[in-house]
Image (tube, grey):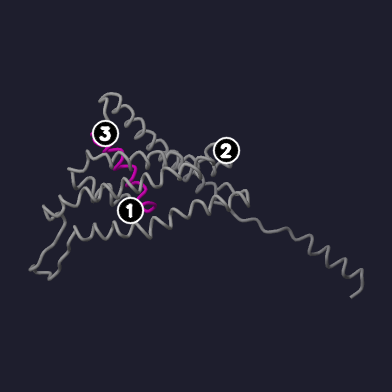
Amino acid sequence: MSAAAQGTSKAAHGDVAPKKKKGPGALATAYLVIYNVVMTAGWLVIAVGLVRAYVARGSYHGLYYSIEKPLKFFQTGALLEVLSRVFLTWAVTHSVREVQSEDSVLLFVTAWTVTEIIRYSFYTFSLLNHLPYLIKWARYTFFILLYPMGVTGELLTIYAALPYVQKTGLYSVTLPNKYNFSFDYYTFLILIMISYIPRKSIGRLHFPLQKSAIRKTGYTG
């Protein structure tokens, strides 16, 4: 092949612009922005409710009752994202009222609240292509404290519920019955606690790896 032909070939290749990844359409972006704004506002409502209740009571005991309704609403609204949290909210904390005044409940509610305010703010500003450094920093730094704080609160709450579940037989099905089926909710909760080891370990490793990748690529989404 002649030099002229090679030059023409290179020029032709050079004219082909690299394909850009398509982002979500305008309608999808608008929906996601609205969704994340609403969720951010919802968790801010929970945070304000916690603070107001603490100031009014002068104690952190029983604060769950002051934010019970918005917590159930906004946590259930994120059903597909955080199914395990929905389980803890309804199948444990709501169902076993004796644990609602436990310190562990305040522990995981506080961790969830701060986490979700940061997370939904992060998503909103990322969709708008205007992500403040402070929110980006908080997203990948606060987890060092919030993640173990939330997990500890969740596990202690399930543990506190065990005696009540065992005593009352809550959600358990015993034999004999016409379906020839049995289910022990007490044992199921213990298995849930054991499952935290592999599930939460993976989650604990995810954020440092993601943070490292962001530093290398500069990606902010």
Q: Residue at x 30, y 59 (%)?
A: 194
Residue stretch in magenta: 61-84
Give the image quarter of residue 99. Answer: top left
Give the image quarter of residue 38. Answer: top left
N-terminal label among 2 and 3 = 3
Crowdedness near tag 1: few (<14), some (14–19) or many (≥20) residues, C-alpha within 10 Å: few
Name which residue type carries label 3: Leu
Residue holding disc 1: 84
Q: Was residue 72 drawn as part of the magenta stretch in this picture?
A: yes
Name which residue type carries label 1: Ser
Camera-nearest residue between 3 and 67 = 67
Labels 1, 3: front one: 3
Numbered mark located on residue 132 in the image: none
Numbered mark located on residue 133 in the image: 2
Q: Residue at x 86, y 66 (%)?
A: 8
- Look at the numbered disc 3 and give the secondary structure of its residue: loop
